[in-house]
Amino acid sequence: MSRAEPPRGASHDRIYEEAQCYDVAFGFRDVGAECDALADLFARHGEPRGRRAASVLELAAGPARHAREFARRGASASALDVSQPMCDHALRAAMREGVALDCIRADMVDFDLGRRFDLVVLLMDSASYLLDNDAVLRHLACVERHLEAGGLYVIEMSHPRDAFGIGASTSRQWSSEEDGLRVDMQWGADGDPFDPITQIDEVTVTMRWRGPLGTGERIERARQRRFTANEVDALVRASGAFEIVDRLGAIAPPLSFGNDPRAWRMVPVLRRLAGSR
């Protein structure tokens, strides 16, 4: 018997509805070390140099672990996500931790918070949900309006080797456990179609869990875009708002961007131009 096609969302919405399970699944990241590295990037490349990022905005934040960590360090921290369950989960976590977090439900290509930030971050390859150049440019215009002159925008993206199918920078399957809740993830499945013209994958994600929440499963397919380094450079130039001041192959430990297998990400570091809006 053939298996039914998984439901398809605009993003992996049904996966993100299970916010606690998602948080556990990605809890393996060393958020403290990554925030150290982000703070160091700002001190080195933000203008004027050597200062601390006093205000931070995490986009497509999910559980907002990085925003919460910056809040713990004394920064004014905000998190933005399109998923209401994720926003609710992030706020509950911030309350448990005793940190102040402003959490906003909004689309990362169309938001208006009425304020500017020193540092904006978009992590976990969430840029892959910007499916065409118009969405990327609208997104960059939004970030420009929310970033102080001389402020930084750090984007963590998939390594281009994945776009060309010449290697795999990340594992598709992993398991995580926290407080008795075990979550098994598979990001991508054999047979997921890829369109080489649009550079868009139809990515099937499977999340299974068991523990205090009982047992459950979510399977969903959604589109994600693969970016090359040259087109990121071209889109940033086309925005007229930023310059790329650094490129990393990993945030923590920080690695130079290149073909070294240890460089598993593409992390352009953008600085807002002083003459932009």
Image (tube, rainbow, N blue to C red):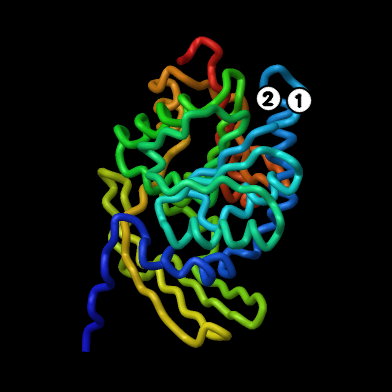
Residue that appears at 36% across and 43% down: 130
Left or right of 98: which side holds 142? Answer: left
Q: Position of residue 98 (x, y in %)?
A: 71, 56
| Frontmost residue, 195 versus 136 | 136
Residue that appears at 41% across and 73% down: 206
Q: Amino acid at mark 1?
A: Arg
Q: Amino acid at mark 2?
A: His
Residue that appears at 65% across and 75% down: 178
Left or right of 127: which side holds 35? Answer: right
Left or right of 121: which side holds 192? Answer: left
Which sits earlier in the primary sequence, circle 2 or circle 1? 2
Question: Which image quadrant is residue 152 in?
Answer: top right
| Frontmost residue, 266 versus 116 | 116
Closer to viewer: mark 2 or mark 1 = 1
Q: Position of residue 168 (x, y in %)?
A: 51, 58
In the rendered image, the residue lying farthest to the top is 275
Neighbor class of circle 2 (other Cα within 10 Å; few <14, some 14-19, many 20+) is some
Quadrant where the N terminus sits is bottom left
* Residue with the mark numbered 1: 51
Whether residue 159 can be seen here? no
* Residue with the mark numbered 2: 45
Residue that appears at 55% across and 13% down: 274
| Frontmost residue, 109 versus 29 | 109
Quadrant where the C terminus sits is top left
